Image (tube, coloured by chain):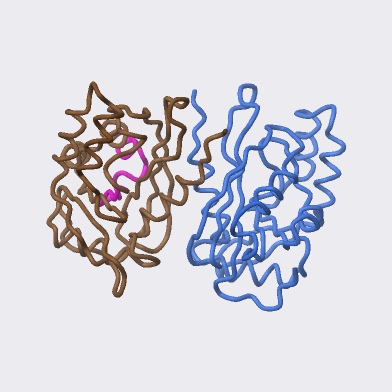
Chain colours: A brown, B blue
């Protein structure tokens, strides 16, 4: 779907993953919040994903496309591209499957050398496929989302870099992190794995 | 704690309970969202509560008082006074324990005759204590939270009715339900009990 104009209350799905305990939990949760631009929340979605699994693309697409909000959603914004441990999202495939442009947002610049080592260590048998997915999500670019604040880092698929910047800037209403992702993150981090 | 003036960005905890499946789930979750007035979300809390149990007062107080937000919170707003099936909140006790005024908010006027029957049916051995807690939360009053919309119904403890009305009206920024409770409810209803 092409975004012709970024309306102030454009519907965006912000996505993050819940905390879990490695070695104990096989599953964790993907959290989606439906936001009107950077303004207010309209809905919340959840779907289970496998810890260190390979189902994030399929599950995120399913969460989006089975939601009653799907017809109104215009953009997906995710926090980073790695969920539930080492479950790696492929942005172009998510765009293809859902028809929705995707922007992955990172607080700080991902250190790809360190990420590669972590994938190799945690998933010795499947790291190559996961690392390939990481690379397929495209270059990492900095964006100044708010005046006078540190930049954030984005990857994107299904839209132009300029459009991604505009979306990020218009929705960073409360902090330098776009509101849909900030709120998905607050909810996601409220899951405290039992000791 | 006395509320002298309702600041636009007063910190409020909105509370609701997650969905569960009776007969299977022994526990469900209490969800708390920290809101700045009716404007924006600052944090999210969770604590387990027993389905049809008697721990809601203790657990809600614990969730509030162990939170890093406790020192800033000025008000608790809950969705209704019954959580996790038949786990009944006692507003004056919650106020006493936390020192924070409490407002319970209902979408429609609770039918106390029906509620009494439900408590008796579901908790035949403990219904009297639960029903007493219900009554202790005080009278149910209607409040027009938004111009041109149906009223909501409130119970309150630790503050005057006029103050409760002002808080409700100032925080009903997106619908007739005050924003902290509307958002807690959106999170809470995203828990879909597995079939």
B114 relative position to A111: left or right? right
Would residue A23 be found to the left or right of residue A149 on screen?
right
Q: Position of residue A4 (x, y in %)?
A: 15, 60
Picture residue at 30% right of the left edge, 50% below the top:
A72
Q: Nearer the viewer, residue B39 or A3?
A: B39
Circle count: 0
Residues drawn in magenta: A62-78
Residue at 78% over, 55% down: B97
**Left or right side of A4 for B31:** right
Instruction: Tell me: residue A67, above or below residue A124.
Output: below
User: Which corner quadrant of the image does residue A29 belong to?
Assistant: top left
- Residue for point 84% across, 49% down: B135
In the picture, residue A126 is in which quadrant?
A: top left
Of the pair A82 and B13, the residue shown nearer to us:
A82
Residue at the image point whose x is 20% and y is 49% from the top? A101
Please determine whether, in this image, residue B11 is positioned above or below residue B121: below
Left or right for B79, reference A178: right
Residue A49 magenta-highlighted = no
Measured as percent of width and height from the top left, residue B115 is found at: 75, 40
- Percent across and percent down for residue A54 are 27, 27
Q: Position of residue A53 (x, y in %)?
A: 31, 27
Task: Work out which quarter of the rendered image holds the C terminus of chain A and state it.
Answer: top right
């Amino acid at each position: 779907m092409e975004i012709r104009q970024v309306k102030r209350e454009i519907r965006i799905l912000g996505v993050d993953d819940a905390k879990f305990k490695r070695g104990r939990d096989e599953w964790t949760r993907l959290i989606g919040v439906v936001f009107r631009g950077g303004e207010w929340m309209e809905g919340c979605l959840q779907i289970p994903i496998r810890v260190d699994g390979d189902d994030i693309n399929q599950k995120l697409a399913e969460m989006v496309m089975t939601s009653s909000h799907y017809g109104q959603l215009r953009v997906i914004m995710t926090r980073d591209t790695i969920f539930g441990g080492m479950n790696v999202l492929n942005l172009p495939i998510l765009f293809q499957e859902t028809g929705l442009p995707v922007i992955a947002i990172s607080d700080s610049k991902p250190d790809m050398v360190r990420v590669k080592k972590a994938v190799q260590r945690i998933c010795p048998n499947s790291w190559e496929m996961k690392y390939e997915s990481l690379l397929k999500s495209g270059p990492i670019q900095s964006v100044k989302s708010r005046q006078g604040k540190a930049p954030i880092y984005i990857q994107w698929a299904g839209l132009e870099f300029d459009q991604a910047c505009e979306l990020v800037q218009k929705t960073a209403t409360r902090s330098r992190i776009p509101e849909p992702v900030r709120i998905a993150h607050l909810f996601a981090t409220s899951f405290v794995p039992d000791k």
